[in-house]
Image (cartoon, grey):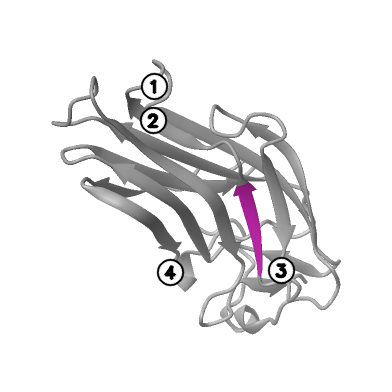
Amino acid sequence: MALSSVVAPHSWNTPPPPDKIVIDVVNAIGTGCPTGTSAVAVSQDNTAFTVTYSAYTALVGVGAGPLDPRKNCQIGLRVHVPQGFTYGIAQADYRGFAHLERGATGLERANYYFQGNSPTAFVQHPLTGPFEDDWHFTDSTEVGAIAFKPCGEERNLNINTELRAASGTSDPKKTTSYVTMDSTDGSITTTYHFAWLTCP
């Protein structure tokens, strides 16, 4: 659902603004991102930003506590864009590593929304053991469905992520399975370059 009703299709061809984009982390809340364990960086060409995590692991089995099988994080970002521009998120890439014993399962899911608007539906990506490798999931939004921050309004971009690990048919008394996330790449572009808009 688009956040701005004044968007004209021809304006979707806007290239990224040339001036530097600054992103402030307003808050980071959740068991997956304790204070000081997440950071944000903007790409030099203003087409993407990356959120990195250093303590985001869902764990089940030997060594796991009662709250470890499910971890979550909500990060509130204030994206400072040059005057005359607004933005939407066209694609999000999530990366991490997982070790899942045979019979165990993992899950990564995420959504995002602008402050004051309804969240998008969660997009879920399951993992099935046995698995021991890096994982990479991409959530893409159809061009006509990209939600843009309303022009002239300061609204935080909220990114919700969640990791889960479940023992399934594996033996949690003898084995350990986990899913960890190390980065979230929020792409503010698509192959059609439709995610920047000029404001009237």
Q: Which mark is residue 43?
A: 3
| Circles 1, 2 touching at the beta carbon (< 8 Å) | yes
Q: Secondary structure at mark 2?
A: strand
Residue 82: image quadrant is bottom right
Give the mark nearest the N terminus, 1 or 2: 2
| Left or right of residue 91, residue 163 in this image | left
Q: Amino acid at mark 1?
A: Ala
Give the mark nearest the N terminus, 3 or 2: 3
| Left or right of residue 102, residue 8 in this image | right
- State the extent of the magenta-drawn residues as a range: 48-52
Q: Between marks 1 and 2, how big is the CA–CA gap?
A: 6 Å
Residue 129: image quadrant is top left
Other residues around mark 1 within 10 Å, as few (<14) / some (14–19) / many (≥20): some
* Residue of label 1: 64
Q: Which mark is residue 154?
A: none
Q: Amino acid at mark 3?
A: Ser
Q: Which mark is residue 142?
A: 4
Q: Amino acid at mark 4?
A: Glu
Q: From this viewpoint, which residue is outermost toward the left?
A: 169
